[in-house]
Amino acid sequence: MAPQVDLSQWADLPVMATKSIKSRLPTTISRSTILIVVSLISTWIFATVLVPQVKPTITSQIDEARQRLPSVSIDWAPNDDPRKNYNTSKVALIIEPEPLPLLVPLILHMIAVVPPDWRFVFIGSKKSVYTVGREYGIQLQQGLGKIDLMRLPSPWSIKTEEDLNRLYTDSRFYNEFLPGVEWLLTFDSESILCANAQSSLNDWLDYTWAGAARADVKAFAGYGKLSLRRVSAIQQVLSFQKRYNDTDQEDIWFGKRLYILPDAKLANLTNEVFSVQNNVTERPMGYHALGRGRGLAR
């Protein structure tokens, strides 16, 4: 408890000092002069006598007020990984080595259309990763943990279509770069999901493979770069089958084997259409438009 200072003894000091000084000075001195002298003396007394006694009391009261304030702790560098806010088993993947101007608006559109629990991965070359990564919209999504930009180390290559065929049919690609992923949405610069689609991507999660439909093939709708794939089924096929280089495209190669795989559920033209490739269908989930749409049937 802070000591209490009794100031009552100093209350009459100015009056007493005024009377004493007035009685000792000549009568010709004005009242204003006396008041100035008294105020100077009072100021000196206050500064040399009262302040040293009152200061500890004020300091003590300030310390008590500080102790009653709630403590606040701010963690300026949290250790939480923002990627934990998303479902790690759902990834939308785009692979593009060319620094195309449309990549950023396409990726941001897909982020807006795909359900919010999905994460995105962009795999590209040095130039394409730089082109995508320098845009503020992508940097914001990176900070939120929504998208990762990466370049594959040697000897992986994404320069040609055959490179991608070998990539998708190699189990090491999934184990090393997509660990824990079960549902993989693949898309490229020629494909897009429709914002006004009547169904959600999550409505297709019970399918083993759902891709673009072709008018000349009724039994299997899994062509093109816009497709939803179950990685566990892919790994199952790769556990007993190996694709020979420079043979079927990876989507056709997987389709032939998944078609005979027990319990596999594949999209086809008789059911709801996931996406279309060379034919226009009313209200699909998306389009894989070959040649930027030049390959669509008129």
Image (cartoon, grey):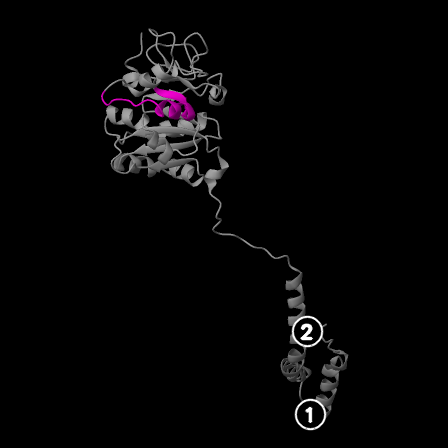
Q: From the viewer's perspective, is 2 left or right of 208? A: right
Query: Circle 2 sits in a helix, a strand or a loop, which is it?
Result: helix
Q: Answer above or below: position of 290 versus 28.
A: above
The residue nearer to you, when weighing 6 against 107, is 107
Residue 87 placed where, x, y %?
A: 48, 32
User: Residue at 47% across / 41% down in the picture?
Assistant: 82
Q: Which mark is residue 57?
A: 2
Query: Circle 1 sits in a helix, a strand or a loop, which is it?
Result: loop
Mark 1 residue type: Leu
Give the quarter of the image for residue 294: top left
Residue 110 placed where, x, y %?
A: 41, 26
Residue 135 placed where, x, y %?
A: 35, 37
Q: Residues within 10 Å of mark 2 (few under 14, many from 20)?
A: some
Q: From the viewer's perspective, is 54 left or right of 184? A: right
First along the sequence among labels 1 and 2: 1
Mark 2 residue type: Thr
Residue, disc 1: 25
Q: Which mark is residue 96?
A: none
The residue nearer to you, when weighing 196 against 240, is 240
Q: Answer above or below: position of 51 versus 21.
A: above
The N terminus, quarter of image: bottom right
The residues colored magenta run 225-246
Q: Residues within 10 Å of mark 1 (few under 14, many from 20)?
A: few
- Nearer to us of marks 1 and 2 is 2
User: Residue at 36% across / 36% down in the picture?
Assistant: 176
The residue nearer to you, when weighing 19 against 216, is 216
Q: CA distance from mark 1 to mark 2?
A: 39 Å
Question: How many marks overall?
Answer: 2
Asked whether residue 230 is drawn in magenta, I would say: yes
Residue 188 placed where, x, y %?
A: 33, 24
Asked whether residue 216 is drawn in magenta, I would say: no
Q: From the viewer's perspective, is 280 left or right of 62? A: left
